[in-house]
Image: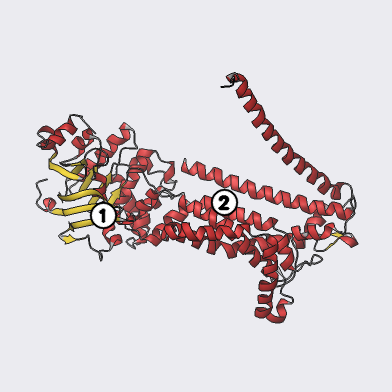
Amino acid sequence: MSDTTQNEALLTTRNVTVTYDLTHEALHKTDLTFKGGEVTALIGPSGCGKSTFLRCLNLMNREIPKCRVGGEIFYHGRNINTKTENLFELRKSIGMVFQQPTPFRKSIRENILFAPKKHGRLHGKDEEDELVETSLKQAALWDEVKDKLKQSAHALSGGQQQRLCIARTLAMKPDVILYDEPCSALDPISTFTIEETIRSIAEAGAGICQIIVTHNMEQAGRVSDRTAFFYMGDMVETGTTQQIFSAPKDQRLSDYLTGRFG
Amino acid sequence: MAKLMPKRSLENVGLTVTGLCIALVALVVVTLIVMVAQQGLATFLQDGVDFWSFISGGNWIPEDGRFGALPLIVGSFSVTLLSTVFALPVALGSAIFVVEVAPGFGRRVFQPLVELLVGIPSVVYGVLGLSVVNAAMRAIFGEAAGTGAGILSGAIVLAVMILPTVTTLSIDALDAVPNEYREGSYALGCTRWQTVWHVVLKSALPSLMTAVILGMTRAFGETLAVQMVIGGVERSMPTGLLDPAATLTTALTSGLSNATTGSVQYHALWSLGLLLLAMSLVFIAVIHLIGKKGAKKRG
């Protein structure tokens, strides 16, 4: 990650605060910066606000009634946490992968092409074929499904479905991908493949910024360059993953790492 | 405390009681089918009416010994299909509103309102149809509508009657689509409308089809309200939607008063009943088939 263009700050949050039901504050004044080409892990015990924070970054929290997001979120230097921001336009370049794989009730091919087609990006079958192939290759799924692209995506295994969701996200050519505990519904082998996929996307040099919420600390250690630790709605400590795991400064973080709670 | 029964014999009592319930239900179903089949088939086996002329004959004039049920079959299917065509867009639209647009208002106010429609007795629909729908037909189509009674009137009344069934089941169908699917679509920058149309409706398709077919089953079997607005012309084929006609159910009811037990006319009415029964079985079979296919796809 020596390339200077890759180290541009893509996303910066300032004083981001989230309240549910108008009174319950789930996240308190969080400042973080995410750079292109980096993988950042958000860790912390259940209910610490890490997923809530992640869902701010593509304004997904706006889909939840009575959820308020305060503060500023800068994407390419522009504050997106405004009333006038076009959420749908924004989410074309900030992709998201969820805890449960969510392939649509369509064929594998149509799952990839659905959004790009709807957004009028594709012209002709050649472009479609190419996009399907490159996206599936990036998500390390091509070899397994290349002969059954027309089959229902629901026939795939859980891990394959999740990689299809990653491929679907990549097909939109985003520069940020958010992962909300993408492996918690998967077996260890599928988990390993997903982690490799995330690493290969990071190392492909496309400058894609990846942010992953995980409750699995080994996973954070394996995939991320930087880590941020959340606790009870506060972002407690952030740094390089190596520093966070080997030399935590905050007592709560070192307690968490040594398994005193979580 | 009273002495408890030993566990084993208590279990046996439970098994016997529930088993008897099942046996009773099965007995009722089997007896019903056997009886309708026996009486209905007598037309062909005992009275010598040709089955094909029964199915394809264009004149239902029992007093002349002419048993062509095709006008009734056509009547039944046309009111059923038309009423579904009328009811489906409204039901689907309301379901989308309730689930996707305004769940609070929809659930609290709209859904109970629609469910109120279920409780209204069919005779009330019939009276309303007679005085409102038939009159409207006369006003709109003039001479061509005659008295206003006809297939179109029947279909409109039926559409209102099946609306709550189709709406409620469609609401359940859309509601059962996991929220993750919607978020998955939003995460790709799709708008609400794209999400509803391409993701939610598509995922809910099998359940929506079940909703439609249950609505059709109800429309197919409804008698009284249809009888009051359709005109009751059984003897010949209807030639247009404004023509007075009859359905399998209405012909069965109106024919019963003229038929003496054991006569050909009497058996022919049972044959109509058998036809109705067979159609309901087909509807139910289709629902099961859809359910199975849906389960396999989701598997």
Count residues near mark 1 (Cα–Cα under 10 Å), then give few for <14, some for 14-19, many for 20+.
Answer: many
Image check: B129 left or right of B55?
left
Pick the residue in front: B277 or A197.
B277
Residue A152 location (% of width, % of height): 44, 46
Does residue A98 appear to the left or right of B230 in the view shown? left
Give left or right: position of A85 versus B62.
Answer: left
- Mark 2 = which residue? B210
Task: Name the residue at 70% across, 65% down.
Answer: B126
What colour scheme does the image use?
A: secondary structure
Q: Is residue A89 above or below residue A188?
A: below
**Residue identifier under label 1:** A58
x%, y% of residue A31? 14, 50
Q: Above or below — where is B175 with respect to A84? A: above
Identify the secondary structure beneath mark 1: loop
Q: What residue type is labelled 1?
A: Asn
Q: Which amino acid does label 2 sit on?
A: Thr
Comparing B221 with B264, the one in front is: B221
Splitting the image into 4 quarters, where does residue B8 fall? Answer: top right
Q: Is residue A35 visible?
A: no
Check if mark 1's residue and mark 2's residue have beta carbons within 8 Å: no
Is label 2 in a helix, a strand or a loop? helix
